Image (spheres, rainbow, N blue to C red):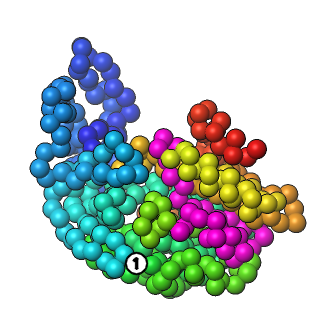
Amino acid sequence: FLFCSRFVGLERAGRNRWRLVHFRHQQGMASAADKSVAAAKAAVPGDGKRGLEGLPTGWFAEVSDMWPGVAAGIQVKEVLYHERSKYQDILVFDSTSFGRVMVLDGVIQSTERDEFSYQEMIVNLPLCALDKPAKRVLVVGGGDGGVLRELCRHSNLEKVDIAEIDEGVIKASKEFLPHMAKGFLDPRVCVHIGDGLQYVKDAPEDHYDVIIVDSSDPVGPAAVLFEKPFYESMHRALRPGGIICTQGESIWLHLDIIKEVTSMCRGIFQGGAVSYAYTTIPTYPSGQIGFVLCTKARDEEPLQPNEPRQPAPPMDLSSGPLRYYTSDLHRAAFVLPAFAAQVLSEAAE
């Protein structure tokens, strides 16, 4: 990934040249910021020939049938771990620009540099939209621990269950991604290794305030997490007025999948509400990924997930302040581009 970040403005200074006019240092990142400034000043225009030559040796290319004809690349500094678990291929490497990276079945799951934008939104969109603070939450997937880390900022939570099918992901994250896996250390977290679909099916009725599905794309072991029986089981396990929030794919690549899933959810969560929201994250395909949020019917009018009703969690001493989620961004995340809004409105008819 080649881009410059953390500067507020650029001023054109001659054809094909840019001059940095303002740069804002962030706490604890001065050296990285200096390198970014130096790289920006030293940058020269590229050419088509260089691009046609493809990625040089020492780069990871994210090639997948889920986004045919597109492949993002990250320069690899050192491969730290590469094994195949019972369920999937697991790769962890240090990169030159995005810190430590976890890859499952050839698809980037998280990088140190930008993972917070996904984790903070998939957690705080549902928890902050509730009519009263959550006490019981279930996470399906999420073996890297990032969702748990963000959940544990919420002091009102009494218990967090996590159902992860692949113990290999948890072990790799604890060893190589401790900044994310710290969520496993919280005494409120109860880990269940096994099939998430079966765990939800066996859960008590009307039990959870929020269910978060932090799954990979609908291929391999995660495919069942996009199907109707799973959503029906989540609806049963959710309390009235509760919310589910699932990884909902990209409007740029998978709008047909999003339309199908939201249409299916409207048939299941009758009397509730179904919405799609999104976040930006550079290392995910197209730089954007979304969430499908569904609220279960209650005695009152349907709970709309686009309105934050609970305050954002305070700064955590071990994880620091939130870096992405705000109440204003919560509302904005549900405002979609015209093309996407049109297609998803058809799903509501």
Q: Is residue 90 above or below residue 33?
A: below
Q: In the image, what residue type sits under mark 1?
A: Asp
* Extreme-top residue of the structure: 14
Q: Is residue 82 above or below residue 74?
A: below
Q: Answer with left or right where residue 77 lies relative to residue 115.
A: left
Question: Where are the magenta residues, as a range?
Answer: 224-253
Q: Answer with left or right where residue 102 lies relative to residue 133.
A: left
Q: How many marks?
A: 1
Neighbourhood count class around disc 1 (C-alpha, 10 Å): few under 14, some 14–19, many 20 upward: some
Q: Residue at x 29, y 38 (%)?
A: 4
Magenta-colored stretch includes residue 312: no
Q: Secondary structure at mark 1?
A: loop
* Extreme-right residue of the structure: 299
Q: Is residue 247 above or below residue 341?
A: below
Across and down, in percent, residue 158 comes to 62, 81
Q: Nearer the viewer, residue 14 or 274?
A: 274
Q: Which residue lies under the disc numbered 1?
A: 166
Looking at the rendering, which quadrant does residue 36 occupy?
top left
The quadrant the C terminus occupies is top right
Q: Residue at x 61, y 78 (%)?
A: 200
Across and down, in percent, residue 280 comes to 46, 46
Q: Nearer the viewer, residue 88 or 41?
A: 88
Q: Answer with left or right where residue 283 lies relative to residue 205.
A: left
Looking at the rendering, which quadrant does residue 2 occupy?
top left
Q: Residue at x 26, y 23 (%)?
A: 18
Q: Is residue 42 above or below residue 264?
A: above
The quadrant the N terminus occupies is top left
Q: Nearer the viewer, residue 85 or 187?
A: 85
Across and down, in percent, residue 170 comes to 37, 77
Across and down, in percent, residue 15 comes to 24, 14
Residue 48 visible in the shown view: yes
